[in-house]
Structure formats: structure tokens, C-alpha cells
């Protein structure tokens, strides 16, 4: 079965083999202990994607945390990882779990942890959780759990719907008037994941025509891994060409990675997209200070852009958590990695 080990962004395993309710309870207990050590009045936001048993694993986590005295904010419906991150940052929660295996095959599920900054928990935050979870499992610990109904009725577990607040926050960073005037048509490929309804609603609200595909609930993801790379985006490419759309946007299973298809149906590489994000931040948003934070596997296009505009570049190891870890304590312009995660 292997040890409980957190990788580049969370712990993942095959459902019912490595990723079980007993092991999730041990990880939840470890999260609760570390969070309460940091803040005796700790809160935790818990989100989950549309994978098989994700909500049930999230409820298991909520019941363990509530029994420990952690105030739980529980997403009433499935939500994206960025939405969970938004609430974690807004509420200043020490550690907030997100049940998802991201872009992995459907037999997997996973446990991500978000820090109070909204990004992936830092290595320093994750290390004690991993150590405690392994210790609890080795000792055969069965954590106390609050009954779900009791948690709801007592207020220890509060159901929230953060989607509207999250989308409103995103909208503040958009040039809504320009987007309304552009008259573009966008294909939104939810890939049967947690991004279903999020980007579509946002585009609808700002007046951009959006055609959403692969939005039905399908824990097998239609036989295609929910990873927005060329080989998995045949549906996006076909729909863009069929409808004459100007753009295709595809999200992975928890909607923290983005795949882009242009008006011809060509897949735009993540390296190209990140370079465009940086170019937009500098030339359109006027952000002239701070570093471009990228991973070692990112394109030299970013270095050339930095040279042209006189800004610095910092290179991290592979993984968005390392990008985010650096950004916490430094002045940054934009950050991103080769898998399709970006921030400005």
C-alpha cells in the first residue's frame, strides 16, 4: 500500500487500495493537530471535485476536524481548487483540505492542502502533517469523528457556497467592458470536472458567448484523463472548428490547470500561454516590478521577455508549490509552471 506521502501538490492514491477512508481520517487528524497548534481557534475550508467518493472523503475529513474543535467551512457543492484557495485566503485558515486527484486517471483520488495564503501549503507546513499521518496509521489510530448531522445542526460544520463570491472576485481582475465589446465566442471544456459551470457562468455574466462541453457528471471522465493536453482535447478542438469559436479553454479535473486551443483548433502550448500571460501583465496591466517566477522546465521565452522589459527571473524546481513557496516572501510579477498553472 505504501506510505502516506505528499508530492508536488498533495497526496494521491488508488481508491480503496491506497486512498481509503481510514487513511483519509489519519491525514485529517494530522491536519487538525497541526492547524490547532498554529491557531487554537483554527478554521478549515474543505472543498472537493466530482471524482468518485470525493464528497464522502471530504465529509470524513470534516467530521474528524469538527471532533477536534476545528471550525469547518464545507462546500455545499463540488468546487474548483482555486475556489477552495480563495476561501482559505479570505478566511485565513491555517490548512484547508481539497479532495481531488487533479488530472490523474479516474481510479485515483487525492488530498491537497491549501495554506492561509491560498496557494499550496508550503513544505514546512506539509512535513509535520505527513509525519503525523504516517505515525497515526502505524499506531492504528482511529480518530474521533463528529456525526455529520450533529456537526451541521450544531454549527461545527457550516455549509457554504463560495462560487458567487469567488467569481465576483475573479471578475474584479477582468476588463469587463472590453470583453463585452469584443464579440468573441469561447468553447469551455469542463472535462467532466469541478470547473463545470464556473467559467461558463463567469463568461455568461460578462456577456461573452460560451459553449460548455463535457459538463455532465462522469466519474470515469468519458474514458479520457482530465488533463488538458493535446491528446485529450479532441472534443475541444472539434467543437472550436464546428462552431467557428475564437478560443477553446479546457480545465483539468479540479480546474487549476488550463489548456488553450486557438481559433484554428491548434493546441497552444503551456509555455506559449505562460509567455502570453507575462506579456499581458507587463504590457497591458502595467506591472513593471517584481520577478517572473518559473520552473526549471519552463521556456526561455520567459527569459527573453524579462530581458526585453528589464525585469528579473527566478527559477524553481518543478511543481507549482515551489513557485508559490518562493512567491510568498518575494516581490513577483507573475508565476507559472509547465503543467498549465499560472498566477498574476
Image (spheres, rainbow, N blue to C red):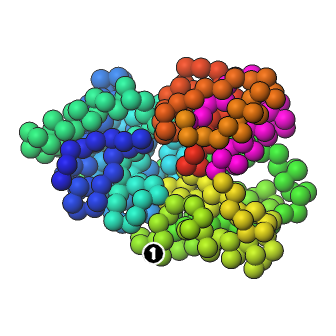
User: Extreme left residue here?
Assistant: 139
Q: Residue at x 75, y 33 (%)?
A: 304
Q: In the rendered view, does 38 fall on the left or right side of 276?
A: left
Considering every residue shown, the one lying at the far right of the view is 181
Q: Quadrant of residue 238?
A: bottom right
Residue 41 locus on image (x, y percent):
36, 27
Residue drawn 64% across and 21% down? 331
Q: Quadrant of residue 302?
A: top right
Question: In the picture shown, does residue 150 fall above or below 204?
Answer: above
103 left or right, relative to 60: right
Give x and y (percent) for residue 256: 55, 50
Mark 1 surroundings within 10 Å by alpha-carbon count, few (fewer than 14), some (14 through 19), many (20 or more) = few
Q: Residue under circle 1? A: 223
Q: Position of residue 147 (x, y in %)?
A: 24, 52
> Is 146 above or below relative to 304?
below
Q: Is residue 289 magenta?
A: yes
Residue at 81% over, 61% down: 207
Q: What secondary structure is found at the residue carrying circle 1?
A: helix
Is residue 204 something one can see in this rendering?
Answer: no
Q: Work out which residue is located at the far bottom of the displayed protein and give it.
A: 242
Instruction: Pick whichever, 20 or 168, lies toward us.
Output: 20
- The segment highlighted magenta reads 270-295
> Residue 307, can we see it?
yes
* 275 in the magenta segment: yes
> 64 and 49: which one is in front?
49
- What's the residue at 76%, 34% (across, down)? 305
Q: Give the side of residue 126 with respect to residue 195, left or right.
A: left
Amino acid at each position: 500500500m505504501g506510505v502516506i506521502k505528499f508530492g508536488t501538490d498533495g497526496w494521491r492514491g488508488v481508491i480503496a487500495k491506497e486512498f481509503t477512508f481510514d487513511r483519509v481520517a489519519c491525514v485529517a487528524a494530522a491536519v487538525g493537530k497541526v492547524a490547532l497548534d498554529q491557531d487554537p481557534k483554527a478554521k478549515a475550508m474543505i472543498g472537493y471535485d466530482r471524482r468518485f467518493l470525493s464528497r464522502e472523503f471530504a465529509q470524513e475529513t470534516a467530521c474528524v476536524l469538527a471532533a477536534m474543535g476545528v471550525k469547518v467551512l464545507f462546500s455545499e457543492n463540488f468546487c474548483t481548487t482555486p475556489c477552495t484557495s480563495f476561501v482559505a485566503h479570505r478566511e485565513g485558515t491555517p490548512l484547508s483540505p481539497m479532495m481531488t486527484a487533479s488530472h490523474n486517471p479516474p481510479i485515483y483520488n487525492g488530498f491537497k492542502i491549501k495554506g492561509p495564503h491560498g496557494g499550496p501549503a508550503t513544505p514546512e507546513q506539509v512535513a509535520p502533517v505527513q509525519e503525523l499521518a504516517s505515525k497515526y496509521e502505524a499506531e492504528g489510530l482511529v480518530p474521533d469523528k463528529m456525526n455529520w448531522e450533529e456537526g451541521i445542526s450544531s454549527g461545527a460544520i457550516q455549509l457554504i457556497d463560495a462560487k458567487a463570491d469567488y467569481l465576483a472576485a475573479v471578475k474584479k481582475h477582468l476588463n469587463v467592458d472590453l470583453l463585452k465589446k469584443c464579440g468573441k465566442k469561447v468553447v469551455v471544456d469542463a472535462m467532466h470536472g469541478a470547473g463545470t459551470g464556473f467559467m461558463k457562468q463567469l463568461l455568461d455574466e460578462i456577456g461573452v458567448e460560451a459553449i460548455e462541453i463535457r459538463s455532465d457528471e462522469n466519474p470515469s471522465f468519458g474514458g479520457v484523463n482530465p488533463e488538458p493536453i493535446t491528446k485529450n482535447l479532441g472534443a475541444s478542438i472539434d467543437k472550436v472548428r464546428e462552431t467557428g469559436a475564437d478560443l477553446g479553454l479546457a480545465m483539468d479535473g479540479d480546474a487549476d490547470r488550463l489548456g488553450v486551443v486557438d481559433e484554428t483548433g491548434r493546441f497552444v502550448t503551456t509555455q506559449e500561454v505562460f509567455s502570453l500571460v507575462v506579456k499581458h501583465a507587463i504590457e497591458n496591466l502595467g506591472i513593471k516590478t517584481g520577478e517572473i517566477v518559473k520552473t526549471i522546465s519552463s521556456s526561455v521565452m520567459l527569459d527573453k521577455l524579462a530581458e526585453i522589459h528589464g525585469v528579473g527571473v527566478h527559477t524553481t524546481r518543478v511543481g507549482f508549490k515551489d513557485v508559490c513557496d518562493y512567491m510568498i516572501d518575494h516581490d513577483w510579477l507573475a508565476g507559472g509552471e509547465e503543467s498549465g498553472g499560472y498566477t498574476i
